[in-house]
Amino acid sequence: MAEADVIVKALLYTHLLIFLAIVQRPSPYRKLWFLPIFFLSLYLFFFQPIPSGFSTTGNSFGCALATSILTASDFILLTDVQTELRLQNDKQHIPSAPLRTRMGWALRLLTSQRAIGWTHEPTGRIRLKPTASRWAFVISRIFWVAYYAVLFDLLNIMMQWNFAVIKGEVNYGGKFGWLITRISFLPCFIEIHLGVSMTYNSMAAVAVTLGLTEPKQWPPIFGRWSDAFTVGRYWGRTWHQVLRRLLTAHSKFVAKKVFRLQSGTSLAWHVQLYVAFALSGLLHLAGEYRALNNWKTGGAMRFFVLQAVAITFEDMVIYLASRLGFNKTTRASKLIGYVWVLGWMIWAVPSWTGPLAKARIGGPEEKHSMILAFYQ
């Protein structure tokens, strides 16, 4: 498909250069690799055309290029990867390893966005790794893909509800009309969850079938919904952690190297928090620009910065509650938390998903449910 070619091209060109930079042995000149990656990404971002009407493709394209720049910045500018990063239970000295070994090591690093199997793996943020046999795992992934495909199709029915609200075909009055209207935007957010899950499980099934990886390298991409009783836990545990390494590496650099804050302090943590969400906002802003051809129409930057504000508010509430003697997490406090997180997302999500959903109306990406069409 032509609309997918642009994303493949962006990832192929930029990641090939990142791969070569990672393969190179430690050197003061290795940082020069960042320049061609940066300028190539900018060229593709501003001059590579996107098929007309495919706003979702444009969004993915912009986000992919922004991710490439952040990846290059982390693995080339901020981190001496061959001396600082290491696979678990791997004692070999990568800088002195032969070219073939370094190439395999670099490929595994680039394809391990959540650092599964690496010493910097965020073990407390990742669910337990699968222990099933190879073929049992593959069969289970195929069933999960089918399950997500059905849910994705059913979600398209709810998406039509959201499109109708945006087009003004459905108007809700009364005291709770505004609430129902905002709830109609949640399917766009859920679509991300289902799309990522379906793609991830498809990749897992293929990789394990071909013997390229083992089942233990594919823990669930999303965390448990039961952990999402604060906004902070939602983003830090329930949501996918694909960008965690990139965001934390840069946020720690800003806190330690730029502001020279002491690690472990509340101020340093909050600086890292806001930098991480600001970078996430910029990354998704790049996607919005390619989808909407406008820097101001979307709401990604506002949405992601507000997540940091919400987490700061939570910290204040939790601190005050602990001062009043409420130090334990109970079922009642979790229930209150779930209501708070759901309410927050209902209020915040439309500012981000609304403009992107509006751009899909009337185009080839205004999808309809195949299941609903069958019964009609």
Image (spheres, rainbow, N blue to C red):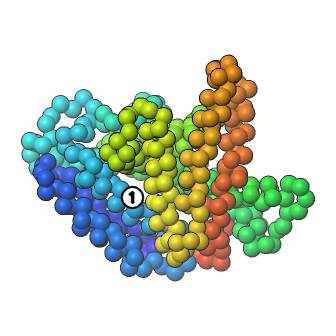
Q: Secondary structure at mark 1?
A: helix
Q: Position of residue 196 (x, y in %)?
A: 51, 52
Q: In the picture shown, does residue 203 fall above or below 84?
A: below
Label 1 Cα neighbours within 10 Å, binned few <14 / some 14-19 / many ≥20: many
Q: Locate residue 194 relative to residue 183 in the image: left or right.
A: left
Q: Position of residue 60 (x, y in %)?
A: 47, 64
Q: Locate residue 272 relative to residue 68 in the image: left or right.
A: right
Q: Residue furthest right?
A: 174
Q: Position of residue 17 (x, y in %)?
A: 23, 62
The quarter of the rendered structure image containing the N terminus is bottom left
- The structure residue drawn at horizontal position 65% and vertical position 55%, both measured from the top left corner, is 349
- The structure residue drawn at horizontal position 8% and vertical position 42%, both measured from the top left corner, is 96
Residue type marked 1: Thr
**Rendered image quadrant of residue 116:** top left
Q: Position of residue 356 (x, y in %)?
A: 60, 67
Q: Locate residue 189 relative to residue 115 in the image: left or right.
A: right
The quarter of the rendered structure image containing the C terminus is bottom right
Residue matched to label 1:
67
